[in-house]
Image: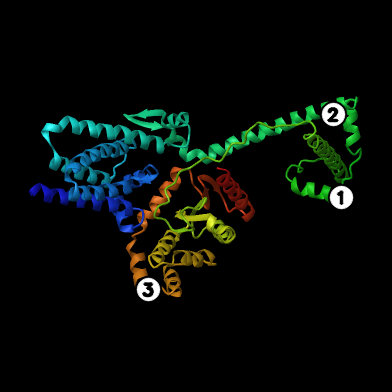
């Protein structure tokens, strides 16, 4: 009888732990509890088995065990052995990703208790066989299902050790992750140089082919397609002088000579443009295929759970914004984001993460104020007031904003004075710096990072690409 009471106590404890694990991303105080022990819970929450989050498997397991104990107790023994195998897999996960997951460890304690209750010395080898079999199968399935999208080579590259210091290692991933944007910019510049050279080579071949098809020289072909004396207006010359004033400071000739020289340069440019346009027009005729690939924006994984969100969780495009309420470019981007949401509706999920720049005095307090408004269901409305304001509001003004939205001002003030969101904002900033964010606004669109106050058309181009990829994928 004592063992039966203990069994039910353990089942209830396991069920409670599993339910809390499920609610970790949905209830703030549960997330705060997990945060006391690090970010291990968030590192493990993305793991799935048969496309079902592991936390839900825990709920199903203890529910099933309760039913077996109630109506088919002989089978409960084997079901506990199955639980041992799964728990070994969960422990393997947290060891392999070097995370401390408090719920995983609490669940392990529950399973150890269940083993004690159901232990049978005469069936110890059967127990070990079942547990080992379940461990091997579940470990293989979870590893296969949750493997990174990148190739194995890329995975090994990320884990590659680039330095060892006093017994501690620095991996390639740790080195390169904060530099991803700079690396992308350098790769883009290399691509630009290569593409310019390649385009010129392609045009030369096309002109040679076309000249040969007409039985004339390439020079004769060029003479037939360019204007001998392109017209260059005084306005064109004036504009050139304005744009290149610093380079022309050392000119020692007369103004008339300078203008004539500039006119010759601009005439040559127009002729070169005519040649480029003509050669490019030959691409279809001679079936040109460019195989040089443009570098893609770096793919970045960022945790967005528990952050303010607009749009459905299954939207094909997730747009994560790192922003500062006092940053002029951020305020401009905020208006653009509303235009985007109005245009794309439920096809976009907009997630906000804080990145108040230390140089902007009061920005962090304004960010905290928005989260205090979030407690009363007015995060986005409050953000709109702050981002659309002409000034940088002080604490008293932030309280006035809360009052204008009909919030409980006493509750709002208490929240703001408590500093309860300091750690969350610091976590956002740390996550941003880890992936190389150093300025605001920065956006991550389906894992691809772009910086600056992009125009609506720039956003639209990238979002349309992601929507097209989602449909074709």
Cα gap from disc 2 to disc 1, whole angstroms: 36 Å
Cα gap from disc 2 to disc 3, whole angstroms: 77 Å
Residue at 16% across, 43% down? 113
Element assignment for label 3: loop
The disc, 2 or 3, on the residue closer to the chain's N-terminal end is 2
Q: Which mark is residue 234?
A: 1
Residue at 45% across, 47% down? 432
Q: Residue furthest left?
A: 1
Residue 7, percent across and down? 15, 48
Circle 2 residue: 210
Give above or below for 263 relative to 384.
Answer: above
359 or 184: nearer the viewer: 184
> Disc 3 or disc 1, which is closer to the eye?
3
Element assignment for label 1: helix
Circle 3 residue: 408
Element assignment for label 2: helix
In the rendered image, which quarter is residue 28 located in?
bottom left
Q: Is residue 12 left or right of residue 92?
A: left
Residue 374, percent across and down? 41, 64
Q: Residue furthest front?
A: 71
Can residue 400 be seen here? The reply is: yes
Cα gap from disc 3 to disc 1, whole angstroms: 66 Å
Q: Are marks 2 and 3 in contact (CB under 8 Å)?
A: no
Residue at 64% across, 53% down? 457
Residue 86, percent across and down? 28, 39
42 or 18: nearer the viewer: 18
Give above or below for 206 relative to 351.
Answer: above
The disc, 2 or 1, on the residue closer to the chain's N-terminal end is 2
């Amino acid at each position: 009888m004592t063992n039966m009471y203990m069994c039910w106590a353990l089942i209830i404890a396991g069920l409670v732990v599993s339910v809390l694990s499920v609610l970790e991303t949905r209830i703030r105080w549960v997330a705060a509890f997990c945060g006391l022990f690090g970010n291990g819970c968030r590192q493990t929450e993305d793991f799935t088995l048969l496309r079902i989050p592991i936390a839900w498997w825990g709920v199903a397991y203890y529910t099933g065990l309760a039913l077996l104990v109630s109506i088919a107790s002989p089978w409960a023994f084997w079901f506990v052995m199955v639980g041992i195998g799964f728990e070994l897999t969960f422990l393997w996960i947290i060891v392999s990703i070097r995370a401390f997951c408090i719920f995983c460890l609490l669940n392990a304690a529950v399973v150890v208790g269940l083993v004690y209750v159901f232990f049978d010395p005469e069936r110890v080898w059967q127990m070990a066989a079942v547990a080992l079999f379940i461990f091997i199968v579940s470990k293989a399935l979870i590893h296969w299902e949750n493997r990174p999208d990148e190739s194995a080579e890329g995975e090994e590259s990320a884990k590659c050790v680039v330095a060892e210091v006093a017994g501690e290692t620095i991996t390639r991933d740790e080195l390169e992750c904060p530099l991803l944007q700079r690396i992308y910019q350098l790769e883009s510049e290399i691509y630009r140089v290569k593409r310019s050279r390649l385009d010129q080579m392609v045009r030369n071949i096309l002109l040679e082919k076309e000249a040969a098809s007409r039985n004339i020289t390439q020079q004769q072909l060029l003479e037939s397609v360019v204007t001998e004396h392109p017209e260059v207006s005084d306005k064109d010359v004036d504009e050139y002088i304005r744009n290149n004033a610093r380079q022309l400071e050392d000119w020692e000739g007369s103004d008339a000579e300078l203008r004539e020289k500039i006119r010759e340069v601009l005439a040559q440019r127009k002729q070169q443009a005519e040649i480029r346009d003509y050669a490019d027009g030959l691409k279809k005729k001679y079936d040109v295929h460019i195989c040089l690939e443009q570098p893609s924006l770096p793919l970045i994984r960022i945790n967005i759970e528990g952050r303010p969100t607009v749009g459905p969780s299954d939207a094909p495009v997730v747009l994560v914004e790192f922003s500062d309420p006092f940053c002029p470019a951020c305020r401009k981007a905020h208006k653009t984001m509303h235009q985007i949401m109005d245009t794309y509706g439920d096809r976009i999920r907009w997630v906000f993460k804080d990145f108040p720049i230390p140089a902007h005095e009061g920005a962090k307090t304004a960010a905290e104020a928005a989260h205090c408004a979030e407690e009363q269901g007015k995060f986005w409305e409050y953000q709109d007031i702050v981002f659309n304001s002409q000034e940088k509001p002080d604490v008293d003004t932030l309280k006035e904003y809360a009052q204008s939205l009909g919030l409980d001002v006493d509750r709002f003030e208490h929240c703001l004075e408590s500093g309860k969101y300091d750690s969350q904002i610091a976590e956002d900033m740390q996550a941003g710096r880890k992936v190389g964010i150093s300025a605001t606004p920065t956006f991550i669109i389906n894992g691809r990072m772009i910086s600056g106050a992009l125009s609506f058309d720039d956003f639209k181009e990238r979002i349309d690409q992601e929507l097209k990829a989602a449909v074709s994928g």
